[in-house]
Amino acid sequence: MVKSSRPAPGACRLAAIAAAACLLPLAAGAQQGDGTNVPVTGHVYKPDKAPATPQRIASLKVPPGFSVTPFAQGLGNPRILAVAPDGTVYASRREEGDVVMMKDTDGDGRADGTPQVVLNRAGAHGLAIRDGKLWLVTVKELFVADLQPDGRPGPLKMLLGDLPDSGQHPNRTMAFGPDGMLYLSVGSTCNACNESNPENATLLRVSPDGKSRTIFASGLRNTIGFDWHPATGELWGMDHGIDYLGDDVQQEELNRIERGQQYGWPHVWGEGGLNPQSTPVGGISKPQWKAMSRPMTLGYTAHAAPMQMLFYTGSAFPAEYRNDAFVALRGSWNRKPASGYEIVRIRFAQGGQPQRIEPFVSGFVNEDDATHFARPVGLAMARDGALLMADDANGVIYRIAYTGIAGRPAPAAAATPAQPVQAPAQAMQAQVAQGNNVPLALARPQAQASGRIEVRSGSIPAGGDIPLRHSEYADGVSPSLAWTAVPGARSYAVIVEDPDASPIKPFVHWVAWNIPASVTHLPEGLQEQPRLKDPEGLLQGKTTRGSTGWYGPRPPVGDPPHAYHFQVLALDTVLDLPPGSDRDAVLAAAQGHVLARGELVGRYAQQQQPLK
């Protein structure tokens, strides 16, 4: 059952623009093919902007005992917030292309003086603070800078310069996980399409120095807001639903995000709704895509546009708020009545499971739905435990504090303000440990066989160098591969691994199976998608990078040559596995069915630093 804290209107409303869409319930859940015929209606609707007057701010709806006051005003376009351990507040401003710094040294709940511009970078958006450093992400670049004693960042150092192009969702966000790694959200380039770059519509896992990055989870249209449960260490995120499916479709999704999982976009939404606008590549059906995807955990009103998210770990709110999550919802443009324009609270049970989503601060849209005076984006916990929210419409940062009610006064201010609680690392570490520090495929029990296969390549001599064009430093095209036929084989599988990689070893560069028994040669430059049309039925799985299909060598610059093992298995069966499965799933399914095996080893080193 889809859960929402707001009742949805019972009927679709007529569209002001023909392109806007609202699916009828039966049509939304039906499998669509070339004959798709889905009636659609909907809205493109934006309430007018009004000034953030004291009267309007005073009219905001909050739970009893809470107050909302301006922390800073006149900021233009503040987006993402980050708070340093000393209480310094940083806000990125997308339109201005900079980062501003604010302090509240007298503790009056308002920023002292005029906010100071401390960084300038076009497209500045995501912020993260750790170990006395500030990380900043733009559309394509990731930077880091040391924080000086006065709070100003020192010179920026570029760590990455090749994040994917932006398209529809250019606003990258990031946060440090309990495992010490940087998690970076990359939105989709479109509303609903098959992305050509596998890093789009994902959450990336990046080492703090930028030298290592993998795709942690995929099928996430635009998960700007995410955080780790303080007690369980599990990662949760709010994803943006697809536009033009109607006033009440698609709901915004709360997902428990795990390594290697796919979350439905662009073909499946919610708990299993099928998108009639899209078609998976490679002949995969939408029910198959649904089976490959993780459904949402909770839903909230469609088109509300979830932004920054955080779990509350302070002591300034009543105890029942601790370990619940807050999410800023920027507000709809593809729905009438308008949705979002609020902060919501996600209530979590003691065991770490979400129960429901409900309004926490609302009223930024007036009663007749005609005007709004804030579009919530950034969300952070101040050093004193209050909640800060950035509005990128009127340029206000709001402070939400608990002031107390009769019989339940506000907690006394602590002499030393508590620092945010660090979530336990075990959940994330366990996910990353899967498949790490294991033997190569041919050395594992599942791949044992008495038969031998000769494996060769038209471009890689045995024990020789792998040409540059096959690496991710250049074209990244798969090499041609051939092997001797094995009598009685019903299919072949290919697994390519690098045992010299770090920190995850062996690093899986290619997983392919159900190669027809009649095929003993793969040409150069195969499609990087879960299912191929040629050879018909060949399935490909996830690499350690998290992408599907061939991922070429990309060892650190200056490393000695890494060895790449092209391993081929002849099987007496066709494996019953879904597209996108990983190496371990293929080996488990192949156990007891391997007739013969063989490998080709090539080497690759990168001595020249590529241009960023």
Image (cartoon, rainbow, N blue to C red):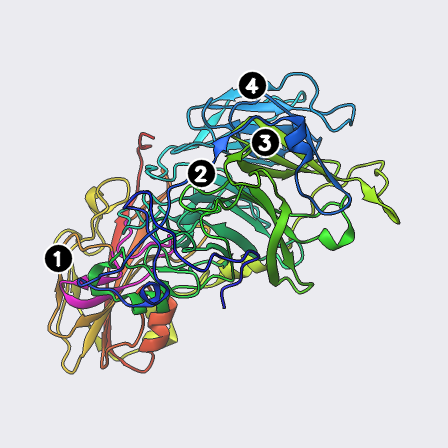
Give how far across and how far down residue 201 sits, in percent: 38, 48
Cα distance, mark 4 to mark 2?
20 Å
Instruction: Write down the residue under mark 2.
Output: 172
Nearer-the-camera pick, 531 or 401: 401
- Closer to the camera: disc 4 or disc 1? 4
Instruction: Write down the residue under mark 3.
Output: 133
The residue segment tinted magenta is 529-552
Tag 1: amino acid: Pro
Cα distance, mark 3 to mark 2?
18 Å
Cα distance, mark 2 to mark 1?
37 Å
Tag 4: amino acid: Val
Which residue occupies 14% across, 53% down? 524
Instruction: Write down the residue under mark 4.
Output: 117
Residue 225 visible in the shown view: yes
Instruction: Write down the residue under mark 1.
Output: 523
Nearer-the-camera pick, 200 or 158: 200
Which residue occupies 52% across, 23% down? 76
Tag 3: amino acid: Lys
> Would residue 293 be counted in the magenta stretch?
no
Tag 2: amino acid: Arg
